[in-house]
Structures are given as C-alpha cells and as structure tokens.
Image: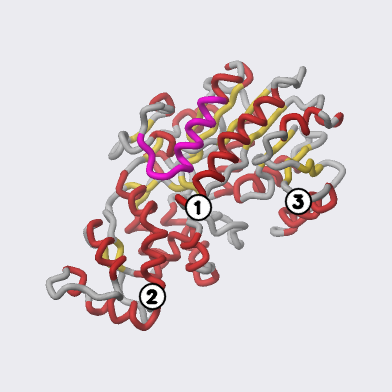
Amino acid sequence: MLLTGATGFLGGEIAVLLSKSPRIRRLFCLVRAADAQTGADRLARVFKFHGDDYDSSKVIAVVGDLGDKSLAQHLCGLEDLRNVETIIHAAADTSFSPVRAAAIERVNIGGTRQILSWSRTLPGLQTFLYVGTASICGTQLANSHIHEDQSPDIGASHLVKYCYSKMVGEMEVRAAIPKEKLLIVRPSIVMGDSRSWKPRSYVILWALAVLDAIRLIPANPHASVDVVPVDYAAKAITELLFTSRNWTTYHISSGKESSTTLEKTLSVVQRGRAGRPEIKFVRPELIEQMKRWPRGLKPACELLGYAEHLAYWSSTFDGALRLLVRGMKPYFRFIDLNQTFDNSRLLSDTKLAPPPPSHEYARVAAKYLDEIDLTAGALDP
C-alpha cells in the first residue's frame, strides 16, 4: 500500500491508523525530503506527536515530490513499489491563498496526474482511493443539502483555487481508474480533533481562533456548517477501505444530524473570555468597513455603532485586523453558502455513528486557540 500526504493533517491520522492494522504488511509513504533518512525522520515525528509507535520496517518513507514532473518515472524505478495493490492519494496543497494558485495546481492537479500515471504501471492494483473534498460542489448549490451524485460539475464556480483543483483532480481520477477499483471520499470541513489532546494541525481551527479574537462576525449566524473532526475523518476512510461498498463515492460529513451553526460553535469557545466584548454577528457587507479600519471611517459608517468592539480592536490588534479580515474572507463566504452534505452512504456501508457536532467537540479544541499564531495563519489561510 502507498499513501501520499502522510505528514499532513488528515494523512498523518490515516498513516497511524493503517500502521496498526494487521491487514497491512507494509505501508509506503510518499514524503517530500532530501533523502530516505530525512523522510523517515519526518514520519517518525508524525507518530511521536501523540505517542504512537513508529515501526520503520512497516511504515516506509519513499522520497518524492508531487510537484515534480518526473515523479511517475521515479516511482516506476523503485522495485519495492511494483507490487503495490492499494494507493491512497490524500496529499494536497490546502491553501486558500490566491498567491499560491500556481503551486496549488501543480500539486493538486499535476501531482495527481503523476500518481495516476504511475498507477497504470502496477499489474496488481486493486484500489485507488482519492481523498477529495465535498466543497467541489461549488457555489451554485448554496443553501442546499448536497448528495454525492451532484458533483463534480465542470461548470461549477468555486470560491478558491483549492476547490477547483480538487474537482479537476477527482475528474481525472474517475477517467483513469476503472470503477471497480475506484474509491473517492469527500470530507467536508475537517477541523480539530474530538479526542482530549492537541490536534496535529491548526488548519481551519485558525479560522475559529480568529473569529473568537475579533468578536464581530460579518456572517450569517444561523447558516449551517458541515464540520468533522480529523479523527472521525481518518476512521471513516480506513473503514471504507476495508468494507464491502455499494458506491464508489462517499461524503465524510456531519450530514443533517450533526451539522451545526457558527453561532453554536462560537458560543462554546467564547466562554471565560474576560476582557473581550460579546461576540456579535453583523451584515456580511460590513467586512469592507472592517478592512478599512483603523485607517479611518466615515462619520455615518455603520461600524461606528460597535464602539466597544472598536475600542477592543484598538487595544488588541492595531493594524493587524485588516490582515486577519482579509485572510478570513473566503471562510466568511463558505459560511454563507449554508451547505450540508449527505452522509447516508457512509453510515449505511460502515458501522460508524454520525460524528459529534462541532459545537460539542469544539470544547476540546478551545483550550488550544490561544496557541495559534493568527498573523501567520492570515498570511497563508
């Protein structure tokens, strides 16, 4: 078995789970590194993070870069990989930053093509598992409960390059891999960890920390948000890998039963925040006024009606607020899409229960919010 993305947020959890499975003799992990030892060291840190045992004879680093146009040729030259029967392609550049558009396409589309090209040379390939995203559905399906067969749509409009690149990647996987060998999983928003320990990444959790910090939220408080913890997403992927499946495509999502709202989630994390004003939701259009602060606001500006928040910003952020709001802009737009994703296929084909709603498990993550570097996250959201 070969796994890409093993040093990432979701991929790291998948790697640890697979390493514990008696069904797997060897797990090859594609790792970007200068050499095999450096790659093994990176994998060892993944396992060390939560105190899991790392067996380098079972979990083996394979040096390679998804951004390398000769990756497929490189993998074809590795004797140990010729008998690989299962590929889990979980790696991706998940940045929402527009300045990373070229890198996102190079890794998420170009890298997927490289893995597909190599997969065609494997005589014993049984399963190609592609980890996509439920957000490939685009903006046309706003205010909807979305089913798997409603995506992908080449005509869909996307808020960020990441979603577009994952849509193209999925379409190319569908075209290249026979249906009987294909498994596509689409996690919704993966945020935090429901277990009582530090999550291995603050991806998405950064956005929650920013919202908790700025306290004035230009978004619909009642919009549904479909969020799952990383441990649930990883468990769902491994369950689907080893079960008898009735479909090729599955949402890994909260669905209707466990979806929640931003207001409910923030009500959990804001408790005990002495010295901070109450969280208030305002019209989405006020984001432009927030971006102009503290450069000066016109006398009739609506934002001036929130004097307590402006005073708090003055004592806390100075000029950093503009950077945070700019980094948050795509997140606000995703929230206002008001989308949930049907998970009935996942629940019917596995023994999994629905995931915990984010307003429940966010209590675990809340204690780590103050550790997050808000400015660094805003520079590459």
Question: Which of disc 2 and disc 3 is earlier in sequence?
Answer: 3
Type of secondary structure dominating the magenta stretch: helix
Residues under labels 2 and 1: Cα distance? 28 Å
Q: Crowding at label 3, few (<14), some or many (≥20) Cα neighbours within 10 Å?
A: many
User: Which element carries disc 3, helix, strand or loop?
Assistant: helix
Does residue 175 lie above or below 306 as drawn? above
CB atoms at circles 3 and 2 under 8 Å apart? no
Crowd rating for badge 2 (residues with CA inside 10 Å; few <14, some 14–19, many 20+): some
Where residue 11 appears, as percent x and y from the top left, is 64, 45
Disc 1 target residue: 191
* Tag nearer the camera, 3 or 2: 2
Residue at 41% from the left image edge and 75% from the top image edge? 272
Q: Which residue is mark 2?
A: 319
What residue sits right under mark 3 in the picture? 43
Q: Would residue 3 be visible to someone looking at this image?
A: yes
Q: What's the magenta region? A: 157-172
Q: Quadrant of residue 198?
A: bottom right
Report the amino acid beneath label 3: Leu
Mark-to-mark CA distance, 3 and 2: 39 Å
Q: Position of residue 374 (x, y in %)?
A: 48, 67
Q: Is residue 354 visible?
A: no
Residue at 52% of width from left, 29% of height from top? Answer: 170
Do the numbered discs 1 and 3 sit on residues whose CB atoms are within 8 Å? Answer: no
